[in-house]
Amino acid sequence: MNANEIRDIVEKHPSDRGGLIAILEDIQAKYSYLPEDALRLLAEETGTSLVDIYGVATFYSLFSLTPRGKHLCSVCMGTACHVRGAPVIADEFSRQLQTDPGETSSDGEFTLDTVNCLGACAIGPVVVMDGHYFSNVDSGQVKRIIKKTRAGLDDAQIKKHMRHYLYDVNCSRCNHSLMDPDHPIDGAPSIRLTMSSERQHGWIRLSALYGSFTVESEFGIRTSTVLDVFCPHCHGELKSPTTCPLCAAPMVTLFIRSGGVLQICSRRGCKGHMLDLEGAGI
Amino acid sequence: MERLQVIEDFSSLQARLTADREPNIPVIVIPAGTCGQASGANDLIRVTKRELLDKGLTDKIHLRVTGCHGFCEAEPSVLIEPQGTFYPKVDAKQMVRIVQAVAADEVLEDLLFADPETGRGFYRYDKIPFFRNQQRSIMRMNQALDPIRIYTCIVSGGYGALQDVLANRSPYQALQEVKDSGLRGRGGAGFPTGLKWDLLAALPDEPAKILVCNADEGDPGAYMDRSILEGNPHSIIEGMLIAAYATGATEGVLYVRNEYPLAIKHLMIALRQCRELGLLGDDILGTGLRFDIELVRGAGAFVCGEETALIRSIEGKMGEPVQRPPFPVEKGINGRPTAINNVETWANIPLIFKLGAEEYAKVGTNGNTGTKIFSLVGKIKNTGLVEVPMGITIEKIVHDIGGGARGNGKIKAVQTGGPSGGCIPADRFDLPVDYDSLAKAGSIMGSGGMIVMDDNTCMVDVAKYFMNFLMDESCGKCFTCRKGTQRMYEILEDISNGKATLQDLDLLEELAHVVKDTTMCGLGQTASNPVLSTLRYFRDEYIEHIENQRCPAGVCKELVTYSINENCTGCGLCVTVCSEGAISGEKKGRHVIDVDKCIKCGSCRTVCNFDAIDVR
Amino acid sequence: MITLTINGLQTSVEKGTTLLEAASSLGFPIPTLCHMEGLSPYGACRLCMVEIGEGPRAKLVSSCTYPAQEGLKVRTASSRVLRARNMVIELLLASCPQSKTIQDIAAAHNIRRQRFRQEYEDCILCGLCVRMCEEQMMAKAIGFRGRGQNRTVGTPFDIKSDVCRLCGGCIYVCPTCQLRCTYTEPEKAICGGCANLAPPCVEKDQFDDMMCYMTPCVACEIEKD
């Protein structure tokens, strides 16, 4: 735990109402659980008594005071899932992972959680693994879900025949092609741009695979830095007047020759993007 | 996005967007709420974009990604506008064909939704019984707009009611309109919304008043709020803005449960776009109206759906309910006047002004106006969200819209109102769904969960399930709620294990009544409903468990044994899934289950294709 | 002033008075566990239920938290109240039979049996200790943790709290262990707890050195080993 990180989180939230729960949510998002030191520091920084913080941390089921596994597996126990057999699914996960609900497997890989309704009742029983939903799960699928998760859910997401490459991305100012066939990423020509940040200037290449967030760059960029992005041909800045729907950083506008506008967030690590096929959208 | 300075700016934006619309270009609409995405809608979107770009169709076919349309059973689905062609359960390969068919102005008959009786496909979505028998005034908006693109909302009428109110009505008139509509809170208790606003409006402007949207939809089995939050977050913002104008409130809070990541994302986007456009903030549309909304995420506690617990949670405390009076409208968040309404209530507000209170009140029955969205789930063929006028019978919902039982089961009850509600038996399906009728029958309207149960559902198990839920979700403050739910669970467990006596049943009933009487908040006061209503309508099932040690539905593990009947073909599928190695037999011969090894997990029954596993 | 009727008697009380206070001032007895003068009302034990309103709108409320309202009709011993109260006592006995306070309440209400599975819990989560610690001792060393069936009272992380001064106030107010400290009235001191000071709500070794409320606790002349 880093004291400055905690202070940053505290500062981000105004001290009036609601602050505490939001702060704890952010701390948990950062460390996957609420470390004791972090809560003590939080008490000091905010002037809230430790008893109150600890009470809140134990009251809400989102929070965990012990470190969680690499993967979080939530089995929905809502009524609809229950009548369709969710308890059997939970038991099966328990058996396969050799851990009880609420606990983390001994290898530290999986934390098994049962939750009271995820609101996806029509497609139950539902299991959410690291944010990926699995629907109509039966006990036979449990092994497969665990195997898939170990292999990495993000990679397995886009099946071959559903892949979509943006082959013809152009500069939104000079309309020059930005494709770089000499440096393929994800098995296809990449999109080349130049960027500057913190007085450094260099190239950056993006994957043209829609849904992939692979990026290569000339120098390392810290996560959540907002970049200035330019066209390597006309050197014009590609900043759009639109802001990222997720983080409010400016978007970078690119044209797709076959008809469409691609906007990507200029913040490193943010996955905000929009692909509008019929003009500029918003 | 350019900030709108005055009301006229909004009107001209709306006019410009409408003029830009090309009504003759077909639109492929793909619903991508949480359910849709879980079923594979994202793949369809990606494939559609690829096809449109590769085939150079971007100016001939448009694509709209929306929230949930309600027919979750058919997800991932595709709707083609303006023809209204509906394709259920589409996969990526079929999607390629669909794009081609739309380009050629053709219909793929083999992919249409087939009439379960005749087998013929429906050419328009609104001819399908599931949609035809509904009255979708709120859900319909979900298919009209892309929730993360505010212009698509404005062009389909979003914020039109706000503009009308700001331009043409006084706050008093706006308030009166809501009162006249007869709208009652959709969160469960059915308190008249206009009256609540009236109480708030009557208070002085200092200290500043707060409006809250309660989006802590915790009832297991209910998810209509999630679909509105995801599919049309603007309807909630617009509703709150109108209330701000009518009551003089200046601050808003949206309390969303953390289990709804997509809803939170869409709300954040919607709020940001509204601020950029000048629909939230100071001097909205140049009218002097000041209002902004803050998004607060819950952290997983069912009890926070209760008003006073919700307030404590927003204040950053443990979600413990406190004594009412004083009511939140007098003393709410940080002691300031606070009016709390549920998501669906807020979404109804713009509708009232679009239709006019008089027209709005024509829907439904006297004292129960408007429509209500139910989430129809469980052992039913057409699971999904159904919007119907209040006062319609359960029968109509379950059979005409829901299509009856799923599989071979026979429907025996519906559970309404979640853990606070109760079970209504099949012979009372002629009951109209409104606040008062359901309460009289021992259940409640609740937020709108409707879980269908068939003869494979054990009512003791259902009561036990809810008690287990409640003893974990009770805040634990009131002794009788905390201990009462534990004790009720204990007795129910004894019953399901065949260890209870008839005296225990009496004690259960006596305790249930006392828990109802002696607890402070709504959670405790309704915690007994699952027990009391199942006792009222399914007492014979309880007695069967106690006297004959038999679970008629074959659910209570301690009372059933698994065996294999003569239907067995010896395929061996069950042997592969049995984790305990309890099944054996010759290939192609009838298998047997070793009852000592069997843990009654039900895996064999799930996989058996020949209905050969008996549970008795 | 607010005028209300309690058991048919009309009375006037100051605004902000609770029904419990109003009834007590008229001499109507209402049993309580989690209520104590000097501590804020909490409403956890549900023993002090009274019936208000009439007809189908009649309901039970906890008198310790419910504010007196103009024209309210209150019944402190209707059959509905008694039925609820008896069940609450039964539930208390089922969970915490060893508490002298609870035994006394049961005896006073003629409850001689309980029909649930017998438990022996140390704490009924009445919250007196939590409020004592916060409101009278200004310490906030202990508080509630968890929710529902997992709710407990204790210090954060179950280790010695930096702000606890070992004042013993929590033990003093505890209805399930208070008799451990009544050595001054030997006839009441039935548990000999002073010799084995293990306050249930803070039962961790860091409190080994804790004195009972009436220090020094050796005064009760029971040897500590």
Image (tube, rainbow, N blue to C red):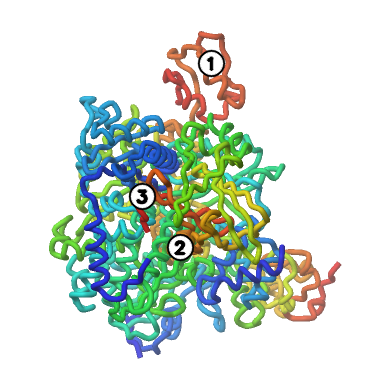
Q: Chain of mark 3?
A: B
Which residue is labeled 1 in the image? B572
| Residue, disc 2 | A243
Q: Is residue B198 left or right of residue C50?
A: left
Q: Is residue B118 left or right of residue B68?
A: left
Say the numbered circle drawn on residue B67: 3
Share a chain, discs 3 and 2? no
Q: How far is the residue under mark 2 from the one under mark 1? A: 58 Å
Picture coordinates of residue C65, whole percent (x, y): 45, 76
Marks 1 and 3 share the same chain: yes
- Mark 2 belongs to chain: A
Q: Is residue B480 visible?
A: no
Residue shown at 43% from the left, 35% from the top: B547
- Mark 3: amino acid: Gly
Give the residue type that dot 1 points to.
Answer: Gly
B63 to B607, vertically: above or below: below
Looking at the figure, which quarter contains the N terminus of chain B? bottom left
Say which residue appears at 34% left-offset and 85% top-offset: B205
Residue sitting nearer the eye, B560 or B572? B572
Q: Is residue B53 above or below residue C4?
A: above
Residue B231 location (% of width, % of height): 35, 53
**Could you say whether the residue bearing mark 2 is in a helix, strand or loop?**
strand
Label located before the other in sequence (1 or 3): 3
User: B414 or A166: which is nearer to us?
Assistant: A166
Q: Are marks 2 and 1 in contact (CB under 8 Å)?
A: no
Label 2 neighbourhood size at 10 Å, few (<14), some (14-19), many (20+)? many
- Give whichever of C6, B33 is nearer the camera: B33
